[in-house]
Image (cartoon, rainbow, N blue to C red):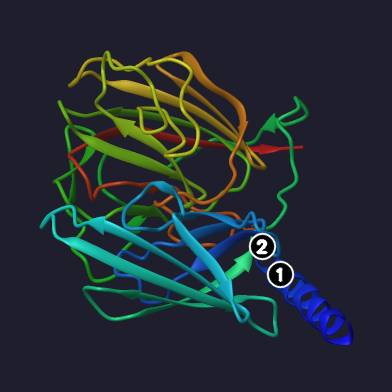
Amino acid sequence: MRTLITSLLISASAFASDAQFNGRWDITVPHESRSRAWWLEVTGAGTPGLKGRFVGFPGGDMNDIPKIEIQKGELRFSFDYNDYTTKKPMHRDYTARVAADGKLAGTMRPSDGEPLEWIGVRAPAIKGQDDGSWRDGRPVELFNHKDLSGWRGLIPDKELGWTVKDGAMANVAAANNLISEQTFWNFKLHVEFRLGKGSNSGIGLRGRYEVQILEDYGRPPNSHSNGALYSRIAPSVNASKPPDEWQSYDIRLVGRQVTVVLNDQKIIDKQEIEGLTAIAGNADEGKPGPLILQGDHGPVEFRKITVTPLVK
């Protein structure tokens, strides 16, 4: 009987320890080649119902984790996939422990390269509701129609791949992502953009949450559509224009609540952003952040970028 009680106490202690993995984690990856942050959610740790979701593998989606476990105080999960370009089968293993400071200390080991160390911190509770109490501050024009003043490349030492022509900024395919020098917290954003058939881009809010830009005229909406909060919130309708026409976004971000109006039609209304998307250039959700213009996919043009801070 004493042996059984001791065994039960040890098991209970292990489950309680496992529970420390539960929650949402914002992840910094110091040597990630594209300067991206990751995001992890763990639920059910310390119970038989352990589950996880992850942003950072191998591209931009929020993925349910198919294989996840906790063994001797270590969180372990893995993914199998086919490489986008070579189509070869690939594998990635992730492990992490909760350090003495409460952070996750992790390692990703790929089948095709060197391991990456990563650090997770608990995602902050972000206060603020889009409740009608916010007023417009002074608008800030982020594009002068002449040059790329106020913008820099997200990936250091990578060529920009952007120019200004006929009053619009434009990229070549696979260019650097642009990041604004100025940072913002709660704001309204007006953007006018144009892209050709089959092209793809995006806008990073606070440098962390991507509103998708996609040529998808006439297609049913989903969480990857034009106007989606990428891989998280689908637009209610497809309000896209045909390719090569100028389109507009009017976006509000207050706390974690986002509203998206595409071409004067509201497609997301005060929906909660759960966490980082793959465009994220830093993981510190509790601080103001820049805008990101995605240039590493297809060609896109921007002719108007106006941010209006929202204040009490």
Question: Few, some or many C-alpha atoms within 10 Å of disc 1 (few <14, some 14-19, many ≥20)?
Answer: some
Residue that numbered label 1 is attached to? 20
Q: Amino acid at mark 1?
A: Gln
Please give left or right for residue 73 compared with residue 247 in the image.
right
- Residue at 69% x, 77% y: name it: 102
Label 2 Cα crowd, 10 Å radius (few <14 / some 14-19 / many 20+) = many
The spot of residue 77 in percent (x, y) is 46, 66
179 lies left or right of 208: left
Check whether the beta carbons of the residues at disc 1 and disc 2 lie within 8 A of each other: yes
Check disc 1 and report its element: helix, strand or loop.
helix
User: In the picture, residue 23 is in which quadrant?
Assistant: bottom right
Give above or below for 160 relative to 61: below
The residue positioned 15% from the left and 26% from the top of the image is 197
Mark number, residue 45: 2
Which of the pair 64/227 is nearer the observer?
64
Residue 312 appears anywhere in the view: yes
Q: Position of residue 5 (x, y in %)?
A: 87, 80
Name the kind of residue labelled 2 in the image.
Answer: Ala
123 or 72, nearer to the observer: 72
Residue 65 higher or lower than 231, as above or below: below
Residue found 38% across the figure and 23% down from its top: 248
Who is closer to the viewer here, 72 or 197?
72
Mark 1 or 2: the one toward you: 2
Q: Quadrant of residue 214?
A: top left
Could you say which disc has been placed on residue 213 in the image?
none
Q: Is residue 209 above or below residue 253?
A: below
Who's the residue at 48% across and 55% down the image?
54
Split into 4 quadrants, where in the image is the C terminus?
top right
Say whether disc 1 or disc 2 marks the residue closer to the N-terminus. Answer: 1
Q: Position of residue 206 (x, y in %)?
A: 52, 49
